[in-house]
Amino acid sequence: MIVVEQVVKVGIADMNIVTAPSTIRTSGLGSCVGVVLYEETKQTAGMIHVMLPDSSLARSDSLTIAKFADTSIPAMIETLKVEGIAPFRLKAKIAGGSQMFQLTTASDNMRIGPRNVEAVKRVLSEYNIPIIAEDTGGNSGRTIEFDPSTKMLAIRTVNKGERSI
């Protein structure tokens, strides 16, 4: 049997899962937050590209579950349960949540990146999922790629290079 390694891509307001030897990647993380959920002994992981903190911000009746922290993380937990991963064994790595524009207003509504990070941390805490590593904040965009076989999250940050957490 030949096993083909591929990169599974996750779009904006999207989520997906991957099993090694494939990896999973999302690009264009500005104020958005990339959330990776995985279990240490399994070689399967899920990734979410969270755009907004709360589904109460939805502007239409049809809800895009992966768009919001409060709906996407529970949905990913359920998806991983179907794959045989116990929720109490999950761990998280997160990246993104930049403040992409300098603001002249002190309005909390314009702090989307920091609010996304806060919301992701709150929802992960509600499910008792520890955050093993994070690369959040700043004012640069990021691309992230997770390898479920090594549990490493590679982060490429605009004008700052690459690092792994």
Image: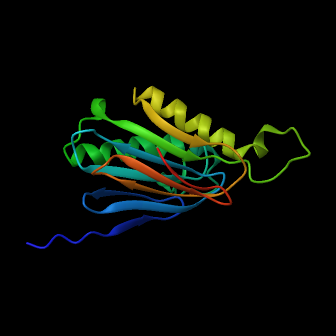
Residue 117 sits above or below residue 68 on the image: above
Q: Residue 125: percent from the left, percent from the top?
A: 47, 27
Q: Residue at x 22, y 72 (%)?
A: 4
The residue closer to the viewer here, 19 or 87, is 19
Q: Would residue 123 appear left or right of 86 to someone viewing this image?
A: right
Colour scheme shown: rainbow
The residue closer to the viewer here, 5 or 8, is 5
Q: Residue at x 53, y 30 (%)?
A: 122
The residue closer to the viewer here, 14 or 150, is 150
Q: Would residue 73 appear left or right of 39 to someone viewing this image?
A: right
Choose top left, top right, bottom left or bottom right for residue 78: top left
Residue 29 sits above or below residue 33 on the image: below
Total numbered labels placed on residues in the image: 0
Q: Residue at x 40, y 26 (%)?
A: 128
The residue closer to the viewer here, 64 or 29, is 29
Q: Residue 158: percent from the left, percent from the top?
A: 65, 60
Residue 18 sits above or below residue 94 on the image: below
Q: Residue 162: percent from the left, percent from the top?
A: 55, 56
| Residue at the left extreme of this rendering | 1
Choose top left, top right, bottom left or bottom right for residue 17: bottom left
Q: Would residue 160 appear left or right of 65 to someone viewing this image?
A: right
Position of the N terminus, as image quadrant, is bottom left
Residue 12 sits above or below residue 86 on the image: below
| Residue at the right extreme of this rendering | 104
Q: Residue at x 70, y 45 (%)?
A: 138
